[in-house]
Image (tube, grey):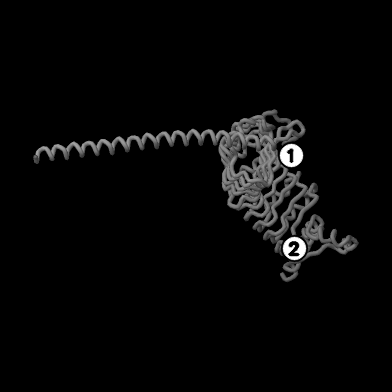
């Protein structure tokens, strides 16, 4: 009887074990089915959501002056869906105050883009795929959180306008940006630059530069460098003249904003910037005005306000006839600059005579 009982117990245990395994197997199979169904529903839902999102985007596409433009303002678009590539023919993006956190990597697919305006968002990075946009003329990413610029941006050979103002921690640019031969407008204001990047100084077509509200302590001694004009009038081979022109620096610059920096002096060669007509130097640490600046005949507007200049001078009474606003505007302007230089020379000459008399 004892052996029969043991045998019966063994059969019962085996049966229970198999039932447990079969139950677990069925549960696993059911879980897999549930996961497949859920994934299928998710794909279907995702595809449906993409369709809805794409429809919303298409509602914000306009045609102006022959350009196809995507324009969104003051809406919530932290990311852009991949479905956007279905509108690949877009030539301009204008996305302002939408909370966009990143420029999608598929941006490189939009090879027809001419203007990319993403100012006033929360973008932290410009992807290297930006270099594929060889037709791009304007890149506007001011008032974001960008802290670096990819070297691939130097491949955007048709770029004419670049704005990176107010990106907080931005303090350098890749040397490859010197390849932007058509760039004439550059805004780097309200960042953390301590000097003007060499790639900026070497931009051959640059006409307008704003580097106000940075931490620039000095301007490069070779801020302007070019072959002497009398040498250019001589007869030289065309290849030589082209090489000379390629070495010119800041030769076309007509507007330079340097307000609210930490400049203590100006290099003498700033006076060789013959195209310069607007120079803003307010709120720096300048203690003198170079005498050579007197010869800058094209300079129409200059501002030295709020600098600890060594000499205290004021304009002659001839300006008393001007209104208060005009007088205030000109107080540290071009007339002030000329008067300051003249007074500096007079006082320097007076000091020299005093020394001679004492001897």
Instruction: Looking at this view, name the residue that lies furthest to the bottom.
Output: 358
Name the image quarter holding residue 340. bottom right
**Count of labels in the image:** 2
Residue corresponding to mark 1: 229
Q: Are marks 2 and 1 in contact (CB under 8 Å)?
A: no
Distance of label 2 from label 1 (alpha carbons): 32 Å
Residue 269's x, y, as percent?
69, 49
Q: Is residue 136 above or below residue 318?
A: above
The residue lying furthest to the right in this view is 321
User: Is 34 located above or below residue 289 in the figure?
Assistant: above
Determine the secondary structure under disc 1: helix
Q: Is residue 323 above or below residue 36?
A: below
Say whether disc 2 or disc 1 marks the residue closer to the N-terminus.
Answer: 1
Residue at which label 2 appears: 348
Quadrant of the frame with the C terminus: bottom right
Estimate the x, y position of residue 227 in percent, counting from the top left.
69, 39
């Amino acid at each position: 009887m004892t052996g029969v009982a043991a045998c019966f117990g063994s059969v019962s245990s085996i049966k229970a074990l198999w039932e447990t395994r079969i139950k677990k197997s069925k549960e696993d199979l059911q879980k897999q089915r549930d996961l497949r169904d859920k994934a299928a529903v998710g794909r279907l839902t995702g595809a449906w959501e993409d369709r809805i999102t794409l429809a919303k985007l298409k509602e914000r596409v306009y045609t102006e002056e022959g350009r196809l433009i995507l324009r969104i303002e003051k809406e919530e678009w932290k990311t852009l869906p991949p479905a956007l590539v279905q509108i690949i023919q877009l030539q301009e993006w204008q996305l302002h105050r939408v909370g966009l956190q990143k420029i999608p990597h598929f941006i490189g697919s939009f090879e027809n883009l001419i203007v990319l305006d993403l100012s006033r968002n929360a973008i932290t990075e410009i992807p290297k795929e930006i270099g594929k946009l060889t037709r791009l003329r304007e890149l506007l990413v001011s008032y974001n959180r960008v802290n670096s610029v990819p070297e691939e941006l130097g491949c955007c050979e048709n770029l004419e306008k670049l704005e990176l103002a107010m990106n907080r921690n931005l303090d350098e640019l890749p040397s490859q940006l010197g390849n932007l031969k058509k760039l004439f407008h550059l805004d780097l204001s309200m960042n953390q630059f301590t000097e003007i990047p060499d790639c900026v100084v070497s931009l051959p077509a640059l006409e307008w530069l704003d580097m106000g509200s940075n931490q620039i302590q000095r301007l490069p001694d070779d801020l302007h460098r070019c072959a002497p004009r009398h040498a250019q009038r001589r007869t030289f081979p065309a290849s030589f003249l082209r090489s000379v022109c390629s070495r010119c620096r800041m030769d076309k610059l007509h507007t330079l904003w340097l307000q609210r920096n930490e400049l203590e002096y100006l290099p003498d060669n700033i006076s060789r910037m013959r195209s310069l007509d607007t120079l803003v130097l307010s709120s720096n640490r300048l203690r003198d005005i170079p005498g050579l600046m007197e010869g800058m005949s094209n300079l129409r507007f200059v501002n030295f306000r709020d600098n600890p200049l060594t000499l205290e001078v004021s304009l002659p009474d001839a300006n008393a006839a001007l209104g208060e606003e005009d007088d205030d505007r000109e107080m540290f302007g071009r007339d002030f600059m000329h008067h300051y230089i003249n007074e500096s020379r007079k006082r320097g000459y007076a000091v020299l005579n005093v020394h001679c008399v004492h001897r």
